[in-house]
Image (cartoon, coloured by chain):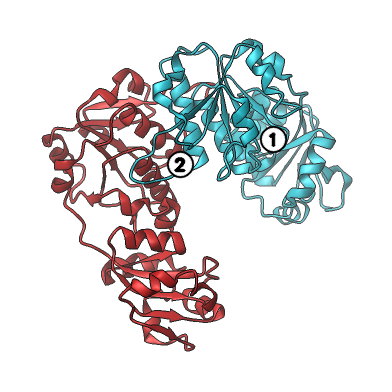
Chain colours: A red, B cyan
Amino acid sequence: MAGLLTIDDPDDPRLHDYTGLTDVELRRRREPAEGLFIAEGEKVIRRAGEAGYTMRSMLLSAKWVDTMRDVIDTAPAPVYVVDPALAEQVTGYHVHRGALASMQRKPLPTAAGLLTAARRVVVMESVNDHTNIGAIFRSAAALGMDAVLLSPDCADPLYRRSVKVSMGAVFSVPYARLDVWPAGLREVREAGFGLLALTPDERAEPLDAVAPHRMDRVALMLGAEGSGLSRRALEASDTWVRIPMSHGVDSLNVGAAAAVAFYAVTAGRPPA
Amino acid sequence: MAGLLTIDDPDDPRLHDYTGLTDVELRRRREPAEGLFIAEGEKVIRRAGEAGYTMRSMLLSAKWVDTMRDVIDTAPAPVYVVDPALAEQVTGYHVHRGALASMQRKPLPTAAGLLTAARRVVVMESVNDHTNIGAIFRSAAALGMDAVLLSPDCADPLYRRSVKVSMGAVFSVPYARLDVWPAGLREVREAGFGLLALTPDERAEPLDAVAPHRMDRVALMLGAEGSGLSRRALEASDTWVRIPMSHGVDSLNVGAAAAVAFYAVTAGRPPA
């Protein structure tokens, strides 16, 4: 361990990683630029460590020291013990989960690297809501998707809210960004994947009729809540698939639709 | 139409249906007792009308009169036009969806009645979160479940938040309450349904191995987020089923799990 340090000055530069956590725009710029992300709460901090992320520092109130003792003892990082009021002053909110850790980002794998090993891939276009991206990662991990590819304008899976909603699943499923969109999909197809575009369009084929769980390699493309996949993305796909709707309902929410589609492409398949 | 009435006194007794809408405990008691529920926003108000619910009254600000003109002209109910500030004073919040309607509840069907016509039934135990129950109804409707049965302690599907999250799906899928729990499940079994209990328990059979879409009549039992089905409910079921988990994830959120299970029991089945 690098030691337990009590800090009582909110302007202490060692707290820099934790400043202004409620300012989403600021943090979206700063975190990737500074190579860090924030893990919040005992469970998520532990999962980040288990997934091989290096801790830069941890910030907690005194009453959490015992709970986090084993993490403190093994992490080669300074641990800042602060008063809850000071934590709130620095971060901008009441840290009711008690502990925050600043973790070092790892270089992302390339899409090509992921595509070699994977057989079931999620491709997200313009999913820029942190809650949705977190929920989709949780379902993708739980339901056995092997990897995630993101269009350039998707939200950051390592943003604090995404990590929390995913319950750490963003650490379990490897992901990469496609640099050009939708041209980058060509690389996916060339790696042997069938590109299935999920859409409510009635011209699409029912998901169960396509029987995607029997396909060797599937890339399932998802768009954002409301707007769905763009026309360009739909045109770049191989097959349009839809989840049949009943009772006059026009759509599922994106989280439910993603979960259903992941199940449909993985059900009955032995784990990779 | 019964007329457009401008009201400028927040204590006007005609506004009684709309008072204290943010007081969840108060509204939970009042609404069933007074035989009403609140539909919020243009889309949900229209869907409630289409589903055959009678309007008691509508409350809106002047700028929504044109949008709701056809509803106003056909509804046999008074329409109260109020200033947004007065609406906020009465309801307790800023009504940004512009229009609220107080609708008359209808008598619920009996479980026996629903079970005669249905082949795919959701049975919820202790789902007492309004957001979750709304989300589950939306998926149940979209994915072709025929009816919903609720344990006595489930939340009210007609509570404002449930209705809104369901996007009106609570009007499309008929539901009933079981008076005794879990003894009421006997009636479901006697109506010819296989009782499948959804659980993460590893002794449960994988959902796809059970092939519930091939069963004639399926009652799918779901518990609340976190706690899941009670031991008593599990014991009262016929078969435990689980959604296989990957990547070390222990569970899906209840909305995602419900959507996957509904898909699994309905996929490939022609609509009833």
Measured along the vertical axis of the image, is residue B220 above or below residue A258?
above
Q: Position of residue A129 (x, y in %)?
A: 41, 51
Q: Which one is earlier in the sequence, the residue at label 1 or at label 2?
A: 1
Camera-nearest residue between A269 and B256: A269
The quadrant of the picture occupied by the C terminus of chain A is top left
Q: Position of residue B193 (x, y in %)?
A: 59, 15
Measured along the vertical axis of the image, is residue B245 above or below residue A128?
above
Q: Quadrant of residue B135?
A: top right
Question: Helix or strand or loop: what does disc 2 sit on?
Answer: loop
Mark 2, residue position: B252
Camera-nearest residue between B85 and B164: B164
Question: Helix or strand or loop: what does disc 1 sit on?
Answer: loop
Q: Position of residue B235 (x, y in %)?
A: 61, 29
What separation in Å lies between label 1 and label 2 (alpha carbons)? 26 Å
Camera-nearest residue between B12 and B233: B233
Q: Position of residue A186 (x, y in %)?
A: 14, 38
Q: Badge 1, how many Cα within 10 Å: few under 14, some, many 20+? A: many
Q: Quadrant of residue A263?
A: top left
Task: Residue type at mark 2: give it.
Answer: Leu
Measured along the vertical axis of the image, is residue B37 above or below residue A43?
above
Query: Residue at the location (41% across, 51% down)?
Result: A166
Q: Residue furthest left?
A: A190
Query: Residue at the location (18% across, 33% down)?
Result: A193
- Is B263 left or right of B22, judged from the image as shown? left
**Whether residue B38 can be seen here:** yes
Mark 1, residue position: B158
Q: Nearer the viewer, mark 1 or mark 2?
A: 2
